Image: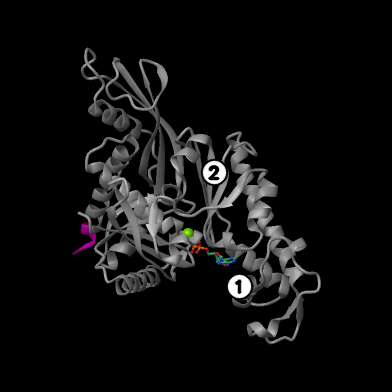
Amino acid sequence: MADEIITGLDIGTSTIRVAVCKTAPGEDGKPKLHVIGAISSPSAGMHRGAVSSMEDAVSAVSKALEKAERMTGAGLNSAWVSIAGQSILVQESRGAVAVARPESEISEDDVERSMEAARTVAVPSNYEILHVIPKGFAVDGQRGVKDPVGMSGIRLEVDAVIIEALNSHMKNLTKCVYRTGLDIDDLVYAPLATAEAVLTQRQKELGVCLVTVGSATTSLAVFEEGDLLHTAVLPIGGDHVTNDIAIGLRTSIEIAEQVKLAYGHAVPDAVDRKEQFVLRDFGAESDEVIKRRFVSEIIEARTEELFESIDNELRKIDRSGMLPVGAVFTGGAMKMDGAIDVAKRILRLPCALGAPVAVSSVIDEAHDPAFATAIGLAAWGHGIKQMSGGRFNFGKILRLKSVDKVAEQLRKWMKSLIP
Ligand SMILES: Nc1ncnc2c1ncn2[C@@H]1O[C@H](COP(=O)(O)OP(=O)(O)OP(=O)(O)O)[C@@H](O)[C@H]1O
Ligand SMILES: [Mg+2]
């Protein structure tokens, strides 16, 4: 199985990213993920993480996949696909079961049943369960158990986080990928996939917030004691900065985007007061001369607002300014110069750009913060495949279970469309 291909497909609002990976034995003998291709291609037909035009989205994804196959020489049959957007719901749930053989030990089967029990939360009628993630177990009322298998007890409880997605959102995304001829290994909630690539277990233990700032959405996931504590998707991203620049300079979105990429800086004080440029250089009609500092002030205002809304999310869980590891950032919009400085000031936390840690690659793009989700999807898939090879790992096993169910439902549904 050394040459197995694992593919992550991240269909963003502005860009589609494909990470083509292989597993190869690492230094410790354990299979390690190796990125052999990191391909980006313009997106279309997507609005805030959801499909808004099927035809356009299918054709954009097809193009991205063709490019990925051409560039890696690998035939892509299936992929782990990200899902995010505003339609995601997060619920806490508790599942409790009687241990099957109380005189002996708690078995894997008991754990699975407790997870099944946790799944039976009231899901809104137009939503589907995407993931059931165990946070911790309790044996006979004693909380804080991480791994109950092998313990003695008569009652097993699990505290789980249930992640749900809008039915139509899931189906449209699935349909879009299937129509390109690609099979889906699973849909994975984007922040969880990104965390898989970018965060270390130690960071998750100590307390960390992972933030991905894309073009239209910003997603975050907070981990503590190794578990997911909070997650959210906010409807704000790099495109809002571009819009503000377009309004401020009274120019088009296209020109504003180019200005942002060429001269953008989120800290006005870091920009020379005298530095200026001519809009005509970007294809505008006017000869207007623009001060770079003025553009920077526009960017700073919107960037501050973005981090304030992240701080608000942290406040909801009493972690504002209070996470030991601080915040780790990914996503294209965090490539803005000075963005990390603004983040530090607003969040009052250590802040740094994230890069995939558990994978190896000689490809430059693999270290691009915008590729973290695509690589994370492959890392997630790799983790699940590893686990079926033997060692027991709750998180992964139970994820796999919810995965199978979802994939099965989606396949059934897809088949029902074929006349
Ligand atoms: N060097 C850069 N400096 C500033 N902004 C940048 C830079 N490179 C990309 N961006 C911005 O990053 C955003 C795109 O990020 P990304 O590719 O992560 O988004 P996406 O995945 O397509 O969107 P989403 O995740 O919201 O669906 C755009 O707003 C773009 O202007
Ligand atoms: Mg994205």
Answer with the quarter of the image where residue 283 lies.
bottom right
Element carrying mark 2: strand
Residue nearer the viewer, 250 or 412: 250
Residue 84's x, y, as percent?
45, 53
Residue 190: % across, % down: 43, 52
**Residue displayed at 30% across by 75% down:** 70
Between residue 321 and residue 311, name the one nearer to us. Answer: 321
Seen as rendered, the residue at the extreme top is 103
Point out the residue furthest to the front here. 27
| Marker disc for residue 209 | 2
The residue range painted magenta reads: 415-419
Q: Is residue 169 something that shows in the picture?
A: no
Query: Is residue 169 in the magenta section?
Result: no
Mark toward the start of the polypeptide (2 vs 1): 2
The color scheme shown is one colour
Q: If the image is split into quadrants, where does the C terminus sit?
A: bottom left
Image side of residue 329 versus residue 15, left or right: right
Disc marking residue 257: 1
